[in-house]
Image (cartoon, rainbow, N blue to C red):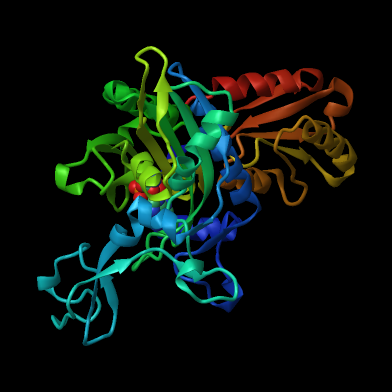
Amino acid sequence: MKPMETPVTLETLVALCKRRGFVYSSADIYGGINGIYEFGHLGTLMKKNIRQMWTSSLDNQLGQVVQMEGALLGPEAVWKASGHVAGFHDPMVDCKACKRRFRADEFDLSKGCPVCGKKDWTEIRAFNMMFKTQLGAMEDGSSVAYLRPETAQALFVNFKNVLTTARVKMPFGIAQIGKSFRNEITPKQFLFRMREFEQMEIEWFCKEEDAQNTFDFWIKHRLEFYKSIGVDMEKIRIRAHEKDELAHYSKNCSDVEYNFPFGWKELEGIAYRGNFDLTQHSTHSGKELAVFDDATRTSYIPHVVECSVGTDRLFLTLLFDAYREDEIEGEKRVILALSPAIAPITAAFMPLTNKLSAQAKLLYETFKKTGMSVDLDESGSIGKRYRRQDEIGTPFCITYDFDSENDHCVTVRNRDTTKQERIAIDGLSEYLKNALHTWKR
Ligand code: GAP
């Protein structure tokens, strides 16, 4: 096995995602829509695993985490209170010569238009990135609604509902996974910057005096998460925001950054939001959002530490991180060396020939019933089937052959090492469980 050193490009991943049905452009047969994507079978399975790992990573020693699923559309009042109507802008500029539109903060305008080279710019305007719509038939101010640009606001707006119904005590967290929408001026780099994307967010509610420790705690905790899902920690770093970079709500913020082929970029934001959001929603709605502290007999508005990562951006990160090429006996092999906890398929069952299909299928059905994500791969030579599974990240290929009829064993082939072992069918479940738990990058 000879590793190839050529670094993976975005184009290679986009092609792999399309070829193997991980991700398609939205409305592909109509030419696609910029910044919007759809996930195929393997992509959907992998995303499900990412969500599952994220949710279980939230367990912590500080307190309880409960779940929520907020609405995608919110009334204008919510987005006025949150500051998004007034402040969720990107600077936009147009090239008068070629009529292309750009984000003005992404390159040096004095060097000219990146498309036509001319230096004939419009004024820079503030462009609000929220998608605005109208609820019902009446087109008046009261029916204005927005697709949410972050999932977080539902967690603030429902803070009191959760506190009074979910039997939680301060401090605690509310976590949510769901879609967000931003009318990005220049969506780019595939799943990195999309117009419709998914976020996994937790808001941690605590006392002001505990906020700094909580912020530090979550930074460490989030790094453990990336390690646990097999990310190369050499490519992960924490970058503290400069004061002038902070969002309108933020007192302190650090990004978890990943070293993408296009540079170090934000993967996750960890922000100390103060009590900005709850104070704003309390003022704008007229509802009391303070909590009572039995120990001090005083009320206070909780402070919040937020961890927010895009599911799709993490999906892309994991693909970059796992992509390898090597050469076996002169033949190129593509592997997604994903953690088994993330790989869309855990094990692929293969009959050596069609004559053994029924037996392989029986094994496949048995494992499928246990809830394991399995595949039945019957066509082509065994070598071809191994390559196919390597390319989609399947950690184990299990072949039922003629010897299996007598020795009741199967051949288990490991994706990463390509080593093959003969394992008793009776002990296969135990073997896989053990191999999955002991997997290391
Ligand atoms: N509630 C805080 C918030 O939304 P953000 O830094 O704007 O903060 C958090 O977004 C995370 O959401 C980012 O770190 C990124 O992973 C993901 N994200 C943001 N905009 C995105 C986009 N246009 N496409 C894909 N993912 C995006």
Which residue is most to the top? 295
**Residue beneath the point at 38% across and 50% down:** 284
**Residue beneath the point at 39% across and 43% down:** 282
**Apparent side of residue 201 relative to residue 304 in the rendered image (left or right):** right
The reply to whether residue 261 is in sight is yes
**Residue beneath the point at 71% across and 18% down:** 430
Q: Position of residue 2 (x, y in %)?
A: 44, 39
**Apparent side of residue 40 relative to residue 235 in the rendered image (left or right):** right
Q: Position of residue 32 (x, y in %)?
A: 52, 72
Towards the viewer: 42 or 87: 87
Q: Position of residue 298 (x, y in %)?
A: 35, 21
Q: Position of residue 339 (x, y in %)?
A: 53, 33
**Residue beneath the point at 55% across and 29% down:** 164
The reply to whether residue 416 is in sight is no
Is 60 situated above or below 190?
above
**Apparent side of residue 367 relative to residue 223 in the rendered image (left or right):** right
Is 323 situated above or below 226?
below
Is 337 situated above or below 407?
below
Which residue is most to the left? 110
Towards the viewer: 83 or 225: 83
